Image (spheres, rainbow, N blue to C red):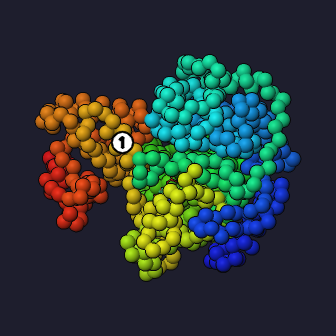
Amino acid sequence: MGYAEFYRRSIDAPDAFWVEQARLIDWHEPPRRICDDSRPPFTRWFVGGTTNLCHNAVDRHLRDRPDQPALIWVSTETDGERVYSFRELHAEVNRTAAMLKSLGVGKGDRVLIYMPMIPEAAFAMLACARIGAIHSVVFGGFASVSLASRIEDAEPKAIVSADGGSRAGKVIAYKPLLDEAIRLSRYKPQAVLLADRGLAPMERVAGRDHDWAPLREKHLDAQVPCEWLQSTDVSYTIYTSGTTGRPKGVQRDVGGYAVALAASMELIFQGRAGETYFSTSDIGWVVGHSYIVYGPLIAGMSTIMYEGLPIRPDAGIWWQLVEKYKVTVMFSAPTAVRVLKKQDPAFLKKYDLSSLRGLFLAGEPLDEPTARWIGDGLGVPIVDNYWQTESGWPILTIANGVEPKPAKLGSPGVPMYGYKVKILHESTGEELVRPNEKGVVVIEGPTPPGFMQTVWRDDERFVRTYWESIPGKQVYSTFDWGIRDEDGYFYILGRTDDVINVAGHRLGTREIEESISSHPGVAEVAVVGVADPMKGQVAMAFAIPKDSAVLGDAAAALKLEGDVMKVVDQQLGAVARPSRVRFVSLLPKTRSGKLLRRAIQAVCEGRDPGDLTTIEDPSALQQIKDLFNP
Ligand code: PRX
């Protein structure tokens, strides 16, 4: 069957289509109803079915592949390498599940995981899945204020963390950040479980903090059965940024997610049991959830978890791992490839990459020179794929597992099975059907399995934010601009909201603004994303200092800029640090007081700021222009 027909069937007969995909996983009880969309925009998949993500990722492979590597952990930061077979992974997950239970964690309780890229992080995720606890992994690069807001929203009974992580050989102590986050949060967790890597000193809070290693010793022989969960129960939440400063808890189910991942492994990634998958992402991001931990393991593949940079000890490290572990499917982000592109291309030829069948890239636009460079260098197909934290798996790409289709440079591809993707006019809601008309990329309900169920504890916010942003139409907005060409290939042209994408990391400019505003020397601030050849975008801040003397004093401005950056580092983490903080006496606003962020962004990128008839004082924009063209 060709892809066009395959896709049509997924849209016209979704129940028949997905019931077939549902056979890819183990069910304890089969679903009674495939798709329940009786209460739009909420969609429930495989209703009445019971299953478990950990069973599908671990236990079910004990029969056929107990000694095959399941988790391959490599750290070039601490010089570590460990391979866990499915049998060993099973044992560790059972121990971790028993540890969590001993700390009072049960079904439906939340567990926040704030961890570096170490095996314990994967054990903790799978252990939660096993006992029906809802995990919420927070990216280790975030700092105390980001962490505190997530603790408050998730209300975790326990937090799993570690003494520290390491980046480029520099240790980042996690525990002080965690303690500060718990201090800032109105909600306090009952227990904290700490993996001690011997990287950074840790202070323990008696009665609350527990060390991983001694507690594990007490549960060496633990056998904790998988909790059979409703397909529609919550498996996890993951926080992501949007237009407001408050991150949203993207909530996912159990059965739909398992089926969606299993299907994508076959139809999109073509990863087969027994082979090795290598995703260079981090467990703190959605790619890490879907394609470091759950997807490959559900498919019976070995998965590589890599702690380190792509260029340390040298730019051959990834390819060395591909050779050593015979990686067949690889997943990364364009930014990482652009980093490699600055290194000696001979590294691409140094190792035997004959096992590799494809490199999937996502998270930000893939520019043509980068795609060409890596494609030519590796000699394997480069597959751009577009999706979001909210979707959990690709929305647009090429399903080579169904029918190989030529990719078009610059386009992530065509809608994946199950996704009704449209382009609508942002203010009239009219569907744009002619080729190359720019509009908002939207998805019509019912959304496919794996897609977010709702915003954690806030159905109203889910509906209001995602489904009511286009006038007169109840459709899911991706908040991305896009066009579709005459052959049906989509092109993504950037966000419609205040989200920016720095080196593949999704950040909210409002969160950064809130953090900068907390500095006593700052009266007001605007943060915009500005195009950057390496990182895709960088955050640029324009602030009005409380003390206007700063404006005429270069040394004072430099000092304040450094101080503001430190505040962002401490509160949100270095990932959110703006590349520059520039000081102005006035910010461009409309007469009704709305910040003209788009105009600022345009000026920073040397583009025409467009219609400025509503601007209150044009000299504000002139100041920013002058900063860029002195
Ligand atoms: O703007 C789009 C961009 O990243 C956003 C989603 O980021 P996140 O929630 O972190 O999920 C990443 C999952 C891979 C999107 O709204 N984006 C993602 N992939 C692409 C992309 N932009 C262009 N091309 C892509 N392939």
Give me the residue at 19% from left, 43% from top: 584
Q: Nearer the viewer, residue 289 or 222?
A: 222
Q: Is residue 122 visible?
A: no
The part of the image, by quadrant, that contains residue 111 is: top right
Number of callouts: 1
Determine whether, in the image, residue 74 is placed left or right of residue 617: right
Mark 1 is surrounded, within 10 Å at the Cα level, by few (under 14), some (14 to 19) or many (20 or more) other residues, namely some
Is disc 1 placed on a helix, strand or loop? helix
Give me the residue at 55% from left, 53% from top: 458
Q: How far across and how far down the image is residue 452, in percent?
A: 59, 57
Q: How far across and how far down the image is residue 96, in percent?
A: 73, 33
Q: Nearer the viewer, residue 83 or 466?
A: 466
Which residue appears farthest toward the bottom when viewing the image? 434
Q: Mark 1 — residue?
A: 514
Q: Is residue 449 above or below residue 100?
A: below
Give me the residue at 59% from left, 19% from top: 204
Determine whether, in the image, residue 542 is placed left or right of residue 399: left
The residue type indicated by label 1 comes to Glu
Q: Nearer the viewer, residue 607 or 207?
A: 207
Image quadrant occupied by the N terminus: bottom right
Q: Is residue 175 visible?
A: yes
The part of the image, by quadrant, that contains residue 76 is: top right
Give me the residue at 67% from left, 51% from top: 234
Q: Is residue 420 above or below residue 24?
A: below
The part of the image, by quadrant, that contains residue 62 is: top right
Q: How far across and how far down the image is residue 307, in percent?
A: 57, 36
Q: How far across and how far down the image is residue 69, in percent?
A: 75, 41
Which residue appears farthest toward the right when viewing the image? 63
